[in-house]
Amino acid sequence: MERVAFESTAIELYASRSSWDATAADLVRTMIERWGLVPGAAFVGGEAASVLQVTTSDGMDAVLKVGFPHVEGVGEAIALESWGPDLAPRVLRQDPWTWSLLLERLRPGTSLRESSLPVLERVRIGSDLLRRISAVTAPPQMPTVTQIVGIYLSDALARLDDQHSTLVALGALDDVERGLAVLESLAATESGTGFVHGDLNPNNVLDAQGRWMVIDPKPMTGGPEFDVWPLATQLGDPRDLDQRLAVTGFTSDRTVLWGVARSALDVTWAVMDSRPAAEAVRVLRAWMRLSGA
């Protein structure tokens, strides 16, 4: 069955993540009953979905994912199907209205972040997947990097007044403002036509019996340089950033500028989420040094 975009009108039903959280358990129960599933243990650590192990009526191990409706995730099922079983888990069933997916269970399912492989080998694995998924022709209904980044930028700029004193205390206000200016410039000049995962962090790359696959995309069209940042940033110390970037093979100026831009954005998210922002500032400055700023 050809997969379709999730129903975008569902986004309007939930003013915030907390409003969706209040209904998530009911949605999960509904889909378990509708699809005749036996529930198992929940997966923890995700931020935009309720995900649990299930068994189907014919005894197959699978994963039920009920997502929080958000604009970046509208094309998730289409992306997974487009990448195919060599790059992503199979979508067994889909309900576009509840943003629900029944997915193939990947075993052992160890993430790239949890893997015991050396850091540079993990970076190489993620980068190889990035090349392969970006080479797949994106369906025409995918949003563009420019569209999604425009939303990120608008929201970040709207937060700056409230975050001003915190960013000053961190000594990061000027760096963040410069990084957001880079983000605006990159979004305005993005012309790539590849398939962008959108959230290629090490938790979203899983081992499937020696094959590595991607999950949880926020799919867009654009250049693959956008996806390098989490692989280079989240698998090691910022002091070794240049070494990891070299392993990715994506070493263009544009890749580094996306690193600056996305790091600045991450600082604003860290402050918004009340998580320690000093490390995010450290990462931003590491990317800025690489850029020569």
Image (cartoon, rainbow, N blue to C red):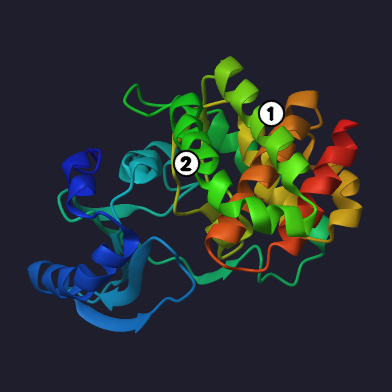
Front-most of residues 276 and 92: 276
Which residue does the image show at 37% across and 80% down from the upper left? Answer: 42
Q: What residue would you read off at disc 1? A: 182
Marks 2/1 in contact by CB < 8 Å: the verdict is no
Assign a secondary structure to mark 1.
Answer: helix
Q: Which mark is residue 155?
A: 2
Residue drawn at x 59%, y 53% as measured from the top left: 163
Specify few, some or many for label 2: CA neighbours under 10 Å numbering under 14, 14-19, or 20 or more. Answer: some
Q: Nearer the viewer, mark 2 or mark 1?
A: 2
Element under disc 2: helix
Provide residue 187's location: percent of width, then percent of height: 57, 24
- Is 217 above or below relative to 150? below
- Circle number at residue 201: none
Asked if residue 128 can be seen in this view, the reply is no
Q: Earlier in the sequence, mark 2 or mark 1?
A: 2
- Crowding around mark 1 (Cα neighbors within 10 Å: few <14, some 14 to 19, many 20+) is some
Which image quarter holds the C terminus? top right
201 left or right, relative to 258: left
Q: Residue at the spot x=26%, y=56% of the render?
A: 92
The residue closer to the viewer here, 274 or 217, is: 274
Q: Is residue 271 left or right of residue 167?
A: left
Of 15 and 291, nearer the camera is: 15
Check disc 2 and give the amino acid type: Asp
What is the x, y in percent for residue 149? 51, 33
